Amino acid sequence: MRSKKEIEKRLHILKTNRPIFGFTLLGDKEEFAIYINPTKACGKIWLPSSGQWKMMVTNDFVNRVTERLIIGEYTNINPLEFLVFMKS
């Protein structure tokens, strides 16, 4: 992304329960949703749209599963977790 206009076109802040933070990045063929939970409590997150979302990255190595696929638009985020989902 080389210009402010291109960034505004592809990056969107998501509505979340504060202080959880989320945004989406729109690629030419992919859509990514990124969430950060800075608290010590679990939280509920709403993905930007319904469909199949595959978890690509998490820093929660204790609770991580080999493949986490979310079908729909709701899931949970663990305390102090960073998540990246890709819509498939």
Image (cartoon, rainbow, N blue to C red):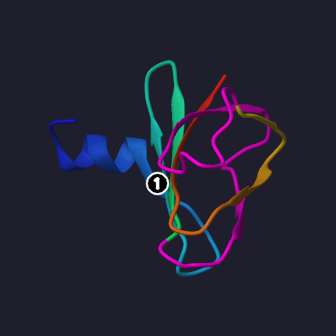
Disc 1 on helix, strand or loop?
A: strand
Badge 1: how crowded within 10 Å, few (<14), some, or many (20+)?
Answer: some
Q: Tell me which segment is drawn in magenta.
A: 38-67
Q: Nearer the viewer, residue 18 or 3?
A: 18
Q: Nearer the viewer, residue 39 or 22?
A: 39
Quadrant of the frame with the N terminus: top left
Q: Residue at x 77, y 53 (%)?
A: 75
Q: Residue at x 69, y 50 (%)?
A: 47
Quadrant of the frame with the C terminus: top right
Q: Nearer the viewer, residue 55 or 64?
A: 64
**Residue 29: % across, % down:** 50, 18
Magenta region, main secondary structure: loop
Single out the residue that lies furthest toward the top.
Answer: 29
**Residue 67: % across, % down:** 68, 27
Q: Residue at x 79, y 48 (%)?
A: 73
Q: Is 40 one of the magenta-colored residues? A: yes
In the image, what residue type sits under mark 1?
His
Q: Residue at x 52, y 37 (%)?
A: 32
**Residue 25: % across, % down:** 44, 41
Single out the residue that lies furthest toward the front.
Answer: 62
> Is residue 15 found left or right of 38 in the rendered image?
right
> Is residue 32 found left or right of 46 in the rendered image?
left
Q: Is 53 one of the magenta-colored residues? A: yes
Task: Establish if 13 lies above or below 70.
Answer: below
Q: Quadrant of residue 50?
A: top right
Residue indicated by mark 1? 12
**Residue 15: % across, % down:** 61, 68
Q: Quadrant of residue 49?
A: top right
